[in-house]
Image: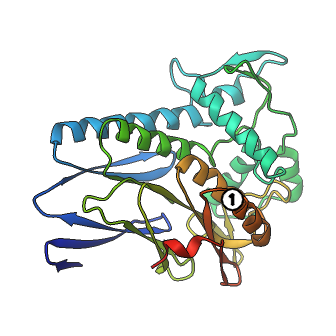
Amino acid sequence: MQKKVNIIIWGFVILLATGIGIAYFTKKNQFQLYKRNLFYMDTYIEVRIYSKDKEKAEQALDGVEAIYKEYHQLSDPYKKYDGLTNVHTIRYNRKRDAYLKIDKKLYQMIEYGLEWMEKSDGKLNIGLGQVIDCWKKYRELKNGVPSKEELEALKVDTEIILKDGDSILNNHPAIDLGSIAKGYATEEASAYLKKQGMTRFLINAGGNVEVGLSDSERKYKIGIEDPNTGGVFTIANVTNQSVVTSGGYERFYEYQGKKYHHIIHPETLYPADYMKSVTVITDNSKLGDILSTTLFLMPIDEGKKLVENMDGVEAIWYGKDDNITRSKGFKQYES
């Protein structure tokens, strides 16, 4: 549905499997919209650029696609790529007490994950890859639930050790960067677009949205999905910011009347059960991605304290009892 107001066209787009709807404005006879749809990291990604220069816009879209492809390959735990040392390499080419040289970007992602493991007191854990893979297998079969004994046998307590900015001790079978890679890629894509002079853009990478300026100087309206109805329960007005949602209502399976989603708690080894979703507003997607996952893995009151001790971060929680909790400054974004 389109509603024209003077020369402004209001378009409201609900993007599937994101938890987020996006409203954007288009001024006639000014900027043209150039867009590309991608699929990396098991996520449908839409990139929109508003520009007066078609050639530069298309080149910028090529650059963004290359960024997502690179991070997809670096973080892929299931496939190796020629000439690339990635998560799969670390998992399946282990040598006792030997260090493996890895790509700088892969090193930085792992290092960032280790920082957040410490900050979260282990609630975020990038070493649960084998447990996550087990749940993925059951989710795809949609039949049965892994036993506690099965999951405990797959849990790896081996310390992840980095060295000299380019190497990792090559003995860890379970690194998983699912809470990191998409945010890293989205933030790098955003920085790349700005460097290319493309300041008017929107990137929607699943539940990870980053926006620059709109083409009308008005703020983007990001609709946050109601986990129960699929509608929108609130709208955040943002520009040059990131809005990231973590929730258990999109990727799950049901067995014997109970839903099992994909965000696994490192202590119980079962899906976290503190809330239905949490949405974070930050200045960058790298932080938003890892923080939203971390918050989903801790009680709401604990997460609220964490957020309110951070600068430039706000969050809204949709509790499992359907109560809504906001950090102190979240209302400034709502309409």
Residue 126 visible in image? no
Question: Residue placed at 49% from the left, 76% from the top?
Answer: 334
Percent across and percent down for residue 227 are 57, 76
The quadrant in which residue 237 appears is bottom left
Which percent across, then down, holds residue 142?
Answer: 64, 63
The residue at 21%/37% (across/down) is 56
Residue 197 vertical position relative to residue 165 in the rendered view, above or below: below
Quarter residue 307 falls in: bottom right
Q: Nearer the viewer, residue 219 or 272?
A: 219
Quadrant in the picture for residue 259: bottom right
- Left or right of residue 223, residue 132 in this image: right
Q: Residue at x 85, y 33 (%)?
A: 159
200 lies left or right of 289: left
Q: Position of residue 277 (x, y in %)?
A: 62, 70
Position of the C terminus, as image quadrant, is bottom left
Question: In this rendering, does residue 267 appear at all?
Answer: yes
Could you tell me the amino acid type at mark 1? Answer: Ile
Image quadrant in which the N terminus is located: bottom left
Name the residue that disc number 1 marks: 263
Query: Coloured how?
Result: rainbow
Q: Residue at x 57, y 81 (%)?
A: 228
Say what secondary structure mark 1 lies in.
loop
